[in-house]
Image (cartoon, rainbow, N blue to C red):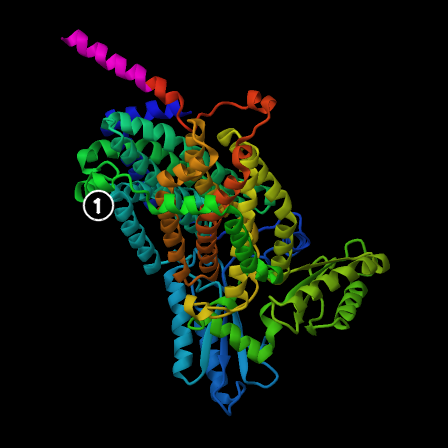
Amino acid sequence: MATFLYKLGRFAFRRRHFVALIWVALLTLAGVGAANAPAAGSTSFSIPGTEAQKAFDLLDQRFPGSSSNGATARVVFKAPAGEKMTDKLNKATVEKTVKELADGSEVVSVADPYQAHTVNKDGTVAYASVRYEVSGTELKDSSRTALEDAARQARDAGLTVEVGGDALQAGADAGGAGEAIGLAIAAVVLVITLGSLVAAGLPLLTAVIGVGIGVSTITVLAKALDLGDTTSTLALMIGLAVGIDYALFIVSRYRGELAEGRDREEAVGRAAGTAGSAVVFAGLTVVIALAGLSVVGVPMLTKMGLAAAGTVVVSVLIALTMIPAMLGYAGRRVRAAGEKRRTRAGAARQDKPGLGARWASFVVRRPAAVLLLGVVGLGAVALPATQLELGLPDDSSQPTSTTQRRAYDLLSEGFGPGFNGPLVIVVDAKDSDAPKAAATKVAHEIKNLKDVATVTPAAFNKAGDTATITVVPDSKPSSVQTEDLVHAIRDQSTDVRADTGAQVLVTGTTAMNIDFSQKLNDALIPYLALVVGLAFLLLIAVFRSVLVPLKAALGFLLSVLAALGAVVAVFQWGWLGGLLGVEQTGPIMSMMPIFMVGVVFGLAMDYEVFLVTRMREAYVHGETPGQAVVTGFRHSARVVAAAAIIMISVFGGFITSSESMIKMIGFGLAIAVFFDAFVVRMAIVPAVLALLGRSAWWLPKWLDRVLPNVDVEGEGLRTLSDDAGKDDEDRELVRA
């Protein structure tokens, strides 16, 4: 591995024009393709194997057209204080609004509140349901404008009017100004770490090119592969973070090789062979973790993981080829490590140990105390995770400044908290002798259940063999009580089938969310076993040790649990919520635990590989285990710390997003990287290695013979460099 990457790095350095041209051409091609790509359209959401999905598919079959993917809107009206929606003037305003909405070119139907009986008992709140023939993402701007204009005119007439539904929903916000601030912080950290604007600019430039290619490719394939906005946001988030970090490690190693007196081409080759090998294996762990999301069995999550994994692959390839090419262009403007400091301070301070080496020496002297403090500290932060409640965000999690959130609140106020999440009961009476009697029996039994507000009469299809019943819970959609109600209805279905021959299924958005959460919970352990197992085998080959990969995996679990605890404290309990812009607390997004396991595991292994490979390199070259720990920190701690700060800055920028899901992901990943880099990798890892001593690098002889020699330490480069030097001398003699 190291020898191949060494040759690749030297090739890219010498053929820099060709390499740069290839990547610029790929970026241009992807950009042009994205600019001319068709609109992505609606993103389907399916959960194969769940009852809610089975019921949804049955509705499509038995009620053709009823489950259209067209956009919907709820225009909610509230009468002024002391008035009713049934008052003459208010009724005239609503009817005028309904008429205007019905004239829209993409509108399929508008339900008049007075004919559809959607005025609440007090007569203070009413709503009109609008259905469109196209999805929310395909809806023309003119249709959205007409919807907003109709609501505004009704407001001008004195009513309170808000609009809910997906007709006004915009695409996922990638973070805006916060992301720009994150990149600015990353740039400052790079300048401080690498010592010059040119050196700092290289990781930023290559990361942007890699993300540009990755996100543009996703845009090109979005319609064909049914990719949503969140897919691009995730690829952007992960791609920027790893792209900058991978380039940083190679540039930093290049500067270190220059400091040892090597010429620039040789320094590039050795940097690519050593740090580049670590980049490859670190990237592989991220790709394994992201691609492993496929085992969950949720198509949306699979696509998100594979798209982000593809962007990571591009970032690795760019770091291995374009960075050496850019270093060739930069020439002497990228200096050797410590050159400026030695010039200013003189040789007297040259050998003074840095902060990383001093910290490692402290940990090696007191490993038990550091280990205990780190584990107890992360354990305390992880405690809130024991109270984790899962769900999916709805309009209640939107900022209060949005009309969707205000519409949600008005409907809750007028019709009850459960009105925003009705359950759809599907009665499949095809095998029943008395379909109507079966549906009546189902409705009657549901009415007697706890936490039921209203149950509508059964509505049959044309064939008369399938009915739908709408159940409005007493509690809000994301509550535990509503989840218990769904399970209670399903528990009764067995008795109903035995008595009537009819099958009862529960679906609707709320039921889909509950089933989605359950499916993710069931998949978490198998997914964790697969990802950690594959990465464990990979790290055994990298470190040629059994205990080091085991320690890496256990440390990662501490990081994830602590990060989940922090997420629960902020987004579920509301601690520091105001500071982070969390306006509404509630259940944690269902995919958050499994998503964090995947992404954080990959990123955690990045730091493990970059930090411990230098320790392994020092140990292989004859240092004692304690000395190897200090040496690894002396060479890598500053760069790993810088990489962590950069990654935290990039992820932290997404906390400013108005999308609650993106905000939660950004915070969760940022805090997880903080815990993993600065507590686990910088404190617990050296403490464990110091306690284990030589046992840390133990590997059974039979396994040593079986494992391939990946040579991450670059041992094979010594002979290669010597041979290259002799060849250069021979060529000089021939010329003479």
- State left or right for residue 391 relative to residue 582: right
The correct choice, above or below, for 272 with respect to 672 in the image is above
Residue in the picture at 56% in, 50% down: 594
Q: Main secondary structure of the magenta part?
A: helix
Q: Work out whether residue 693 or residue 29 is closer to the camera in this orientation and state it.
A: 693
The relative height of residue 175 versus residue 192 in the rendered view (above or below) is: below
574 relative to 674, above or below: below
Q: Is residue 422 visible?
A: yes
Residue extent of the magenta highlight? 721-736
Residue, disc 1: 197
Point 28% across, 50% down: residue = 187
Relative depth, front residue between 734 and 106: 734
Kindly state the secondary structure of the residue where label 1 is placed.
helix
Residue type of the residue flagged with mark 1:
Leu
- Whether residue 647 is in magenta: the answer is no
Q: Where is residue 213 shown, x and y percent of the image?
A: 35, 40
In the shown orientation, is residue 449 left or right of residue 238?
A: right
